[in-house]
Image (spheres, rainbow, N blue to C red):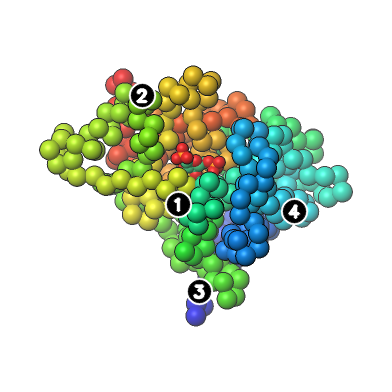
Amino acid sequence: MHNGTTITQFIIEEQRRVSGATGDFTSLLNDVVTACKVISNLVNHGALVGILGSAGSENVQGETQKKLDVLSNDIFIKSNEWAGHLAAMASEEMDDIYPIPASYPRGKYLLTFDPLDGSSNIDVNVSVGTIFSILRCPGEGTAPSKQAFLQPGTQQVAAGYAIYGPSTMMVLTTGNGVNGFTLDQNIGEFILTHPNIRIPTETREFAVNVSNMRFWEPPVRRYVDECLAGKEGPRGEDFNMRWIASMVAEVHRILTRGGVFMYPLDSKMKAKGQGGKLRLLYEANPMSLIVEQAGGRSITGPERILDLQPEDLHQRVPVILGSSAEVARIQGYHLEA
Ligand code: AHM
Ligand code: MG
């Protein structure tokens, strides 16, 4: 039995501190929370409700869509299009932006999301999640365009993720620290269980897909080589490694006990004309805001991710994030190179 602060109460109390707040943003966050509860319920039921496996389609990135990718995308749209808080949405699973239909009032915010991150894990029952970011829509009243979404991550009003793991959690920042909420399935509410999350600055754990090692650039190679050399190497300490292939789960671990997550640029991506694996607007930017708000750092290699000027809706970027001292070291290796 938990009688703590619900996420709704938490958001309303935060809103009271902002003078002139209309409650629009609070209701928008509530709709996002509802969407994540619905997705959580589907993920939990898995094969019982026939939602595992491929949808038989591809998204704009040329990736095979899972049934749950498509369903989660629909749930996000249905939950968030009606209330009048949004001007448009953009998602990993949609080629173009989704302007709010004329049958609903148009609001002042933009919502971007990856409805089911790590979906390659869904059929093997490993943690997946939803990532989202909220921006203000520039040029209020005018029809939203793709251009409206191309704002640096520093402009995000809020960012968060839901993780569908052994328990379902929601981790949220509105630019004033990071808080974690656990879904109490019995009462259907997210309860504040992890107030003011801080990432430990030092770490001895890294996460990277080592099968790509031969394609990496020298600074990443150097960092990982030094970790692997352990006590006998230049770091003088043994490191541990994890790779879940679900960014949400990786970031959640780092928020909990520190560490570094890397999906760096490599020569294989470059040959395909890609700037990285992960998408800037609905993966890298929201996760970077969360990580920085929790005292960590997030970079492409040489640059801070939140400072990047997006050029495209589905732009991909390299991502290196986590404990500040380690990420600073990796950034140093990039700048030296
Ligand atoms: P997705 O949004 O299509 O699920 O892809 C993103 C995921 C990340 O969650 C994860 O870090 C990465 O892709 C895993 O990549 P890989 O399969 O190369 O290990
Ligand atoms: Mg994703």
Looking at the image, tell me whether mark 1 or mark 2 is earlier in sequence order. 2
Looking at the image, tell me whether mark 3 or mark 1 is earlier in sequence order. 3
Location of mark 2 (residue): 217
Looking at the image, tell me whether mark 4 or mark 2 is earlier in sequence order. 4
Closest to the camera, between mark 3 and mark 2, is 2
Mark 4: which secondary structure? helix
Could you say which disc has been placed on residue 249 in the image?
1
Residue 177 seen in the figure: no
Closest to the camera, between mark 3 and mark 1, is 1
Pointers 3 and 2 in contact (C-beta within 8 Å): no
Looking at the image, tell me whether mark 3 or mark 4 is earlier in sequence order. 3
Location of mark 3 (residue): 4
Could you say which disc has been placed on residue 232 in the image?
none
Whole-Å distance between the Cαs marked 3 and 2?
47 Å
* Label 3 residue near ligand 1, CB within 8 Å: no
Quadrant where the C terminus sits is: top left
Closest to the camera, between mark 3 and mark 4, is 4
10 Å crowding of disc 1: few (<14), some (14-19), many (20+): many
Pointers 1 and 2 in contact (C-beta within 8 Å): no
* Label 1 residue near ligand 1, CB within 8 Å: yes
Looking at the image, tell me whether mark 1 or mark 4 is earlier in sequence order. 4
Q: Is residue 173 left or right of residue 112?
A: left
Q: Please tell me which residue is depicted at 66% across the width and 63% down the height of the picture.
A: 49
Could you say which disc has been placed on residue 78 in the image?
4
Whole-Å distance between the Cαs marked 3 and 4?
29 Å
Whole-Å distance between the Cαs marked 1 and 4?
26 Å
Residue 36 lies, in percent from the top left, at: 61, 58
